[in-house]
Image (tube, rainbow, N blue to C red):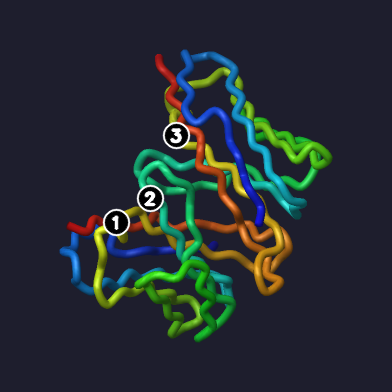
Amino acid sequence: SQTIHQWPATLVQPVGSPLSLECTVEGTSNPNLYWYRQAAGRGLQLLFYSVGIGQISSEVPQNLSASRPQDRQFILSSKKLLLSDSGFYLCAWSVLSGYNEQFFGPGTRLTVL
Amino acid sequence: KNEVEQSPQNLTAQEGEFITINCSYSVGISALHWLQQHPGGGIVSLFMLSSGKKKHGRLIATINIQEKHSSLHITASHPRDSAVYICAVTSMGRAGSYQLTFGKGTKLSVIP
């Protein structure tokens, strides 16, 4: 069966510090991968998605970046965090289909102080 | 771009009550999803449907494609049903890829 992991689970970082969040998927090959952010009181916002190694599409211009160095690994990064980067970050995967049913990881709660 | 609206935003119910959460969207879709987000943050897929009605235990989801509307019903609600329920739709995004658009969620609290 497929599983998706994210770490860390929680993170408190000062403004201006770098960020690296990792997501890995097991039990499937060539998944579509997604990074979402959920700010307090708001819906899920798609940040990045990837259909293959090295292929990243950005949905929202910001100081975050994503990379996919391996088929089942997706990394969200920032060189300098802003206060507005605080939120709940979710990674998800799907297979290529017209229904796009996505399966979510446990999430990382990021607080920027 | 698809717009997804959910109602109500917040809902408090007594244990045992019948609950309905509504979702409407603006553009044609290939599928609609109902998700449950637990207080700890994890998201679980409850239903994926493109027509008609589906039932899992006490949960029922219906969709009316012509009216661009879906409902999630919970029968005999229980405190463990307390969670945020999120509606999401699959439609064609930029560059011809299928993407999800999410509603803001409905926070349900079931009181014993």
From the image, state whether disc 1 or disc 3 is nearer to you: 1
- Find residue B65 and report its horizontal and vertical position in percent: 80, 42
Disc 2 and disc 3 in contact, CB within 8 angstroms: no
The subunit letter for the residue under badge 2 reads A
Left or right of A9 in this view: A43: right
Amino acid type at mark 3 = Ala
- Find residue B45 and report its horizontal and vertical position in percent: 56, 47
Real-space Cα separation, disc 1 to disc 3, in angstroms: 22 Å
Which residue in the structure is indicated by mark 2? A39
Amino acid type at mark 1 = Ser
Q: Do circles 1 and 3 both sit on a common chain?
A: no
Mark earlier in primary sequence (2, 1): 2
Amino acid type at mark 2 = Ala
Q: Tell me where residue A50 sits by quadrant.
A: bottom right
Real-space Cα separation, disc 2 to disc 1, in angstroms: 7 Å
Which residue lies at the image location 53% right of the left edge and 71% below the top edge? A49
Which residue in the structure is indicated by mark 1? A86
Give the SS element for disc 3: strand
Residue B76 lies, with reference to residue A59, above or below; the image says: above
Give the quadrant of the C terminus of chain A. bottom left
Give the quadrant of the N terminus of chain A. bottom right
Left or right of B57 in this view: B62: right
Local crowd size for mark 1, using a 10 Å CA cut-off: few (<14), some (14–19), many (≥20): many
Q: Tell me where residue B98 sits by quadrant.
A: bottom right
The subunit letter for the residue under badge 1 reads A
- Find residue B34 and report its horizontal and vertical position in percent: 60, 42
Give the SS element for disc 1: loop
Residue B83: numbered disc? 3
Disc 2 and disc 1 in contact, CB within 8 angstroms: yes
Which residue lies at the image location 49% right of the left edge and 70% below the top edge? A48
The subunit letter for the residue under badge 3 reads B
